[in-house]
Image: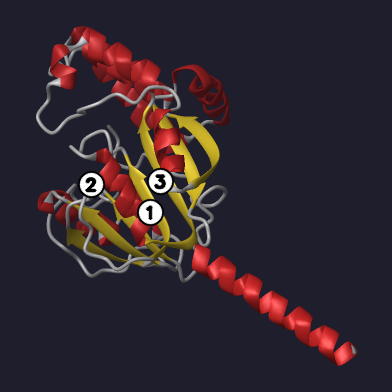
Amino acid sequence: MPDKIVTIDFRRHLRLQAGDWMLDLGSGNGRHTIEACRWPCRVVSVDVDVDELRRARYFLRAPEGAPPYDRYTRQEKEGIAGWADFLVADGQHLPFREGAFDKVICTEVLEHIPDDKAGIRELYRVAKSNAQVAVSVPRYGPERVFWTLSWEYWHTPGGHVRVYRPGEMARYLREQGFDLHTTRYRHAFQSVYWFLRCVFGKNNERRLLPRTMLRFINWYHATRVPLLERIEAMANLVVGKDMILYSRKPAANGAREAAASQRQAQEAGTLERGG
């Protein structure tokens, strides 16, 4: 699929701000890391695949028109205002202190790892109080169709190990303590592409229809024709491939209690002075 497809809405839902520290867990080739670096923020890009991280580091600074992956460059790239660090780590055991990040994203990762609950606990642990957190997983309907059509699709090494039923991921996030506030569906055209891949054979992507659909998606993401965007937005409600859940880590109990105690002390002081 195209390298530049971005699932997370950094402006409206994640509300990325200048100076934020953001964790991109399971960053792959860095598509979300690169998009986040269009803000003057600091991103920590984490993945278990060192080769993917090398590609991400290259793509972050590679000038337009550069080869797909050559070598790391320190050249400044237009539109990149932030900075990223790249780290090999396991999402079930993150090497960061508690409350280290202002924003946390985890896109298309939890369906791959053996212990997804441990991954959610780690997301919660490393997020600051009031931090915005975005998690995306494959949507149940399209994913179940793909699993039914193609044995190869769900037996790919390193592929998906589970399908999340409707409401399941939202329940997991709430049980962990997140305040879930927005759910969105994206990438209906990709659902069509993967349907064709599963029909013609997952490893036969050079067949005419899958190849044509891929070219269309690449062209669409390069041009962003408004009419097609509206068509996909409507299709997302039914066959959007990805489900994105935006949530917030609540203020810690201790912080809330301290704030309440401070307010009480201020009110008592006001009463005493008034007396």
* Quadrant of the image containing the C terminus: bottom right
The circle on residue 176 is 3
The circle on residue 124 is 1
* Quadrant of the image containing the N terminus: top left
The circle on residue 6 is none
Left/right of residue 140 with respect to residue 177 in the rendered view: left
Q: Nearer the viewer, residue 176 or 48?
A: 176
Q: Residues within 10 Å of mark 2 (few under 14, many from 20)?
A: many
Q: Position of residue 263 (x, y in %)?
A: 70, 75
Estimate the spatial distance between the alpha carbons at disc 1 and disc 3, rounded to whole Å. Answer: 7 Å
Labels 2 and 1: the sequence-earlier one: 2
Q: Nearer the viewer, residue 20 or 91?
A: 91
* Residue type, mark 3 in image: Gln
Residue 139 visible in the snapshot:
yes
Image quarter of residue 166: top left
Q: Position of residue 141 (x, y in %)?
A: 39, 16
**Contact check, label 2 and label 1, Cβ < 8 Å:** no
Image quarter of residue 112: top left
Estimate the spatial distance between the alpha carbons at disc 3 and disc 2, rounded to whole Å. Answer: 25 Å
Labels 1 and 3: the sequence-earlier one: 1
